[in-house]
Image (tube, helix red, strand yellow):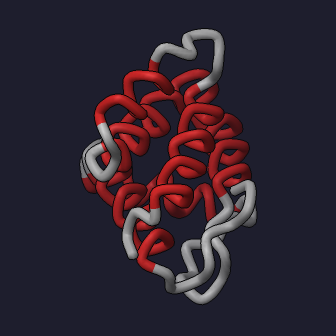
């Protein structure tokens, strides 16, 4: 992630919880399979290391192709619950951006606003 979340910070925990929710919303067998494949590609779920949004996006694209967008959309939706609606709508209006870019922008807004502190 650009300007990585400090390990163990409230924002770091929010991002990890949102990712867990996004993955498990696909069902246990799918989530377990995705976790295994992501880990085999070097993505770590280790909470003592910085969260790597770029690594997650790359790994999901390798595994799911364009369907990776479903996980990123679910991640965006979970994180957007912690932001002002005006900010979320402004980011959503950036239709030319990928969902990955929108999640990055949302995280910038969350850091700016001190979400999770």
At 38% from the left and 23% from the top, the residue drawn is 89
- Residue 97 or residue 53, whichever sits in front: 97
- Residue 4 or residue 73, whichever sits in front: 4
Would residue 27 appear left or right of 53 to someone viewing this image?
A: left
Quadrant including the N terminus: bottom right
At 52% from the left and 47% from the top, the residue drawn is 109
Q: Determine whether 92 is above or below 68 in the image.
A: above
Q: Determine whether 71 is above or below 107 in the image.
A: above
Q: Determine whether 43 is above or below 37 in the image.
A: below
- Residue 112 or residue 58, whichever sits in front: 112
At 37% from the left and 49% from the top, the residue drawn is 79
At 29% from the left and 33% from the top, the residue drawn is 85
Q: How many marks?
A: 0
Would residue 77 appear left or right of 6 to someone viewing this image?
A: left
Quadrant including the C terminus: bottom left
Question: Which residue is farthest top?
Answer: 96
Q: Where does the image place residue 67, in percent across and percent down from the top left?
A: 51, 25
Q: Where does the image place residue 112, in percent across and percent down from the top left?
A: 55, 56
Q: Where does the image place residue 65, in percent across and percent down from the top left?
A: 63, 27
Tell me the quarter of the picture where residue 84 sits: top left
- Residue 33 or residue 16, whichever sits in front: 16
């Amino acid at each position: 992630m650009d300007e990585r979340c400090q390990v163990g910070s409230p924002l770091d925990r929010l991002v990890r919880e949102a990712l867990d929710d996004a993955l498990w919303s696909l069902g246990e067998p799918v989530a377990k399979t995705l976790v295994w494949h992501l880990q085999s590609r070097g993505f770590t779920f280790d909470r003592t290391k910085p969260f790597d949004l770029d690594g997650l996006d790359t790994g999901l694209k390798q595994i799911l192709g364009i369907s990776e967008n479903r996980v990123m959309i679910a991640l965006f939706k979970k994180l957007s619950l912690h932001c002002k609606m005006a900010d979320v709508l402004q980011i959503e209006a950036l239709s030319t951006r990928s969902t990955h870019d929108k999640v990055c922008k949302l995280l910038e807004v969350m850091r700016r606003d001190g979400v999770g502190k």
